[in-house]
Image (spheres, rainbow, N blue to C red):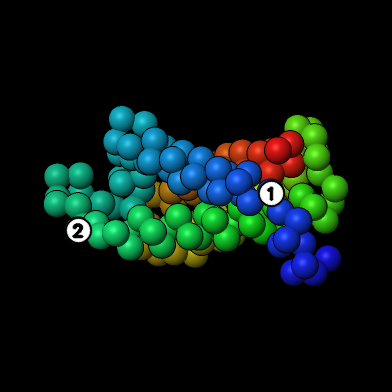
Amino acid sequence: MSFDTLGDLNWLAVIVAAVLWFALGAAWYHPAVLGKPWMRSVDWDPEASPPAMTTMSYVGPFVAYLVGAIAIGMLALATASDTFGEGLVLGLVVGVGISAALFYVTAVFDPQKKEPMTWFWISGLYHLIGIVVAAVLVSIW
């Protein structure tokens, strides 16, 4: 595999995967869904004013999801994943094998988190689902 595979990516699928991953986060972390327990897990006072959000507050994460979707697309090409089942396996391997492992380590070793395991489950599952959606999408499209 080389960076030449970038030309073989279905760029529309990659962009849509990044948009879906980003949109999932907007819903996932909404206070009516998992936002309140997540805020509690990091000891964020829900009554306090939220930090000022700028354009970069949204552009930066979207670019990160786009980079992640590109990497997943490249892995789908390298593994010849082109069915729903293969995309699901790819997403689970990447999501559990890398993302969940890193989120767990971050949760355990970050003394600033009030409820590290709550943070791990909320954040880890969000990214696991986002990665699986991206992997399935770039595999079947």
- Would you say 49 lies left or right of 20 here? left
Residue 90 location (% of width, % of height): 75, 45
Q: Residue at x 55, y 43 (%)?
A: 16
* Residue at disc 2, secondary structure: loop
- Would you say 100 lies left or right of 40 here? right
Provide the residue designation for mark 2.
52
**Position of 3 relative to 17 (above/below):** below
Q: Is residue 12 visible?
A: yes
Q: What quarter of the picture does the C terminus occupy?
A: top right
Identify which residue, 121 or 77, lies in the foreground: 77
Provide the residue designation for mark 1.
10
- Tell me the crowding category of disc 2: few under 14, some 14 to 19, or many 20 or more residues within 10 angstroms, Cα based: few
**Position of 59 relative to 93 (above/below):** below
Q: Is residue 98 visible?
A: no
Residue 107 location (% of width, % of height): 49, 57
Q: Upstream in the sequence, badge 2 or badge 1?
A: 1
Q: Amino acid at mark 1?
A: Asn
Identify which residue, 109 or 93, lies in the foreground: 93
Q: Residue at x 14, y 50 (%)?
A: 48
**Position of 111 relative to 79 (above/below):** below
- Tell me the crowding category of disc 1: few under 14, some 14 to 19, or many 20 or more residues within 10 angstroms, Cα based: some
Residue 58 location (% of width, % of height): 35, 55
Q: Amino acid at mark 2?
A: Ala
* Residue at disc 1, secondary structure: loop
